[in-house]
Structure formats: structure tokens, C-alpha cells
């Protein structure tokens, strides 16, 4: 909750208009969000059976690329939540795992469900999956990654993920 509250304060600060201020906002959002996510665990789960055969260097590179991709996607979405309200509908916790169910209520009263799956890492709760409207982000990526690897290779998957992050691909969209 504290993290979501910090994020909402940053996003609702409407004084950020220029491109430089928007970059500053993105950096601040990443600073707040990044420590709450276990990107290594998310990357490992998203790669599924393809994780084990990878070398340590390949795994580390994949985590870095995956984290950047997910961070960008998440920050893009969050920036649009300036006037929405977040409702915490359910929290379930045991010794090592927790689930926090939320609903984002839009201006026209539509509700978007986002459920956070967390696990305890060094006595801190970290997100290892997001379930958005009943679709697991990790499972969705795993399906996509499996298809790419089956069709070509792990190396092609990494290359494609890097290309999507390049500044040139931003202009293409």
C-alpha cells in the first residue's frame, strides 16, 4: 500500500508537463517501484523450462532486459492512473507468500482488477507476478517466450527484446 500511495502522489503531481519533467517522473516512479519487484524471479518464471539450460551470464542478461521491459510497461500504465482510485479488496498472507487484490476504479466507474502475487525475500515482500484482469503477466510472457524459442532460439528472443527497447522502436509505434 505504501508503494502504491507513493506512486499515486508522484503521478497526481500535475506540474510535470515538459519532456524533461516526464523523464524525471519516470525515474522517480522506477525508484519507488523497482525495489518492490523481484525481477529475477519474474524472469525465471517467465522463461520457465528454458531458464535452467542458460549460463549464469545469460540469466543475468535476461533478467536485466526483462526488468527494463516490464518496468517500462508498468510505468507507462501507471502514468495514466492520475485520477483513478485504488481499492484494496483482499489480502491473503502466509509465512512465505501473499496475494493483494486491488481494483482500479476509473473516472467512468469501470473497475480494472490487478492482483499482486508476492513472496518473502529477506523478510521483505516482493512481487513475483501480476494478474491483470485474470491474466498472469508471468504466464503470458512464458507462452510468448516459448513460442519464440520454439520457432527460432533463445538468442533470437533476447535480440527481439533488446530491439523493442531501442529508442528507434519507440518512434515506430
Image (cartoon, rainbow, N blue to C red):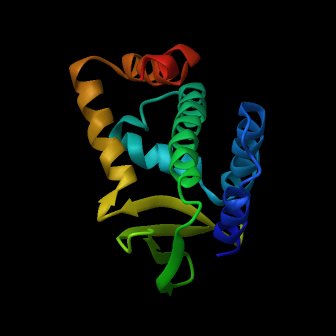
In the rendered view, would you say 26 is above or below 114?
above
Could one spot residue 47 in this view of the protein? yes
Q: Position of residue 170 (x, y in %)?
A: 51, 22
93 or 167, which lies in front? Answer: 167
Q: Is residue 29 above or below residue 122?
A: above
Q: Quadrant of residue 52?
A: top left
Left or right side of 67 for 7? right
Vertical relation: 101 (above or below) 162: below
Residue 100: image location, x then y, percent: 49, 77
Task: Decide if residue 121 is in sight here.
Answer: no
**Would you place residue 138 above or below residue 123 in this image?**
above
Q: Nearer the viewer, residue 134 or 76?
A: 76
Left-right relation of 168 to 155 = right
- Counting labels gives 0
Residue sitting at 33 percent across and 43 percent down?
142
Which of these two is toward me, 146 or 85?
A: 85
The structure residue drawn at horizontal position 51% and vertical position 82%, both measured from the top left corner, is 88
Image-quadrant location for residue 141: top left
Residue 121 horizontal/vertical position (percent): 65, 65
Amino acid at each position: 500500500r505504501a508503494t502504491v500511495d507513493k506512486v499515486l502522489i508522484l503521478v497526481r503531481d500535475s506540474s510535470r508537463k515538459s519532456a524533461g519533467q516526464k523523464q524525471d517522473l519516470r525515474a522517480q516512479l522506477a525508484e519507488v517501484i523497482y525495489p518492490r519487484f523481484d525481477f529475477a524471479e519474474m524472469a525465471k518464471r517467465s522463461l520457465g523450462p528454458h531458464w535452467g539450460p542458460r549460463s549464469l551470464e545469460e540469466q543475468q542478461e535476461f533478467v536485466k532486459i526483462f526488468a527494463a521491459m516490464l518496468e517500462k510497461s508498468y510505468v507507462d500504465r501507471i502514468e495514466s492512473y492520475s485520477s483513478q482510485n485504488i481499492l484494496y479488496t483482499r489480502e491473503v498472507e502466509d509465512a512465505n507468500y501473499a496475494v493483494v487484490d486491488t481494483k482500479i476504479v476509473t473516472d467512468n466507474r469501470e473497475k480494472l482488477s490487478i492482483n499482486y502475487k508476492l513472496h518473502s525475500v529477506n523478510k521483505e515482500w516482493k512481487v513475483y507476478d501480476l494478474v491483470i484482469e485474470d491474466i498472469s503477466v508471468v504466464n503470458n510472457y512464458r507462452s510468448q517466450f516459448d513460442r519464440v524459442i520454439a520457432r527460432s532460439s533463445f538468442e533470437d528472443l533476447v535480440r527481439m527484446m533488446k530491439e523493442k527497447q531501442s529508442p528507434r522502436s519507440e518512434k515506430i509505434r
